[in-house]
Amino acid sequence: TACYGTSVVQIPANNLFAAVDDRIWDNGAACGRDYSVRCLSGATPPNPCLAGQTVTVRIVDRAPPVSTPSSAGTTFVLSNDAFSVIANSAHAKQINIEFL
C-alpha cells in the first residue's frame, strides 16, 4: 500500500480498513488514522444501508482518482468486511457515506 508498502502488519486483524482519495490523503498524513463511517444511501432502491450501523476503519492506502469498482468522486474505498458492516453488498456496490 501507499502507507506501508508490503508489510502485512498494516492490515488490522479485523480487516476493517480503507483507502482514501487525495482530499483526505493529505500527502500521506492519513496513514494509520481511524475514521467512523456510516452508510447514508445507495444509488438505487432498495436502500442498501444497514440501519444504525457504523464501522471504524483504519486508513492503509491512497485510492487512485478512479479505482475499480469505484467511480469518480469516491472518497473512501472500504474493505469488503468494512462495507458489509454498514451496507448490504447484494443491493449496492457503491454507497453514499458520512464519516468522522
Image: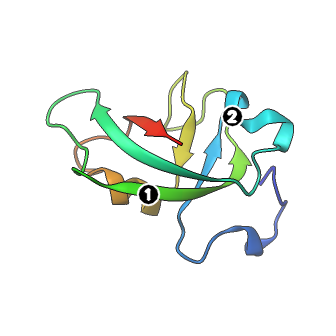
Q: Residue at x 56, y 40 (%)?
A: 76
Estimate the x, y position of residue 55 in percent, counting from the top left. Answer: 44, 57
Q: Work out whether 39 lies above or below 57.
A: above
Secondary structure under tag 1 reads strand
The percent position of residue 14, horizontal first and vertical second, equals: 52, 74
**What label sits on residue 24 in the rendered view?**
2
Mark 1 is on which residue type?
Answer: Val
Residue 91 x, y percent position in the rendering = 22, 43
Name the kind of residue labelled 2 in the image. Ile
Q: Which residue is mark 1?
A: 55
Q: Label 2 neighbourhood size at 10 Å, few (<14), some (14-19), many (20+)?
A: some
| Local secondary structure at mark 2 | helix
Location of residue 84 by image quarter:
bottom left
Q: Is residue 30 above or below residue 96?
A: below
**For residue 15, above or below residue 29:** below
Image point (57%, 32%), residue name = 75
For label 1, the crowd category at 10 Å Cα-Cα, with few meaning under 14, some 14 to 19 and many 20 or more, is some
The image quadrant that residue 4 belongs to is: bottom right
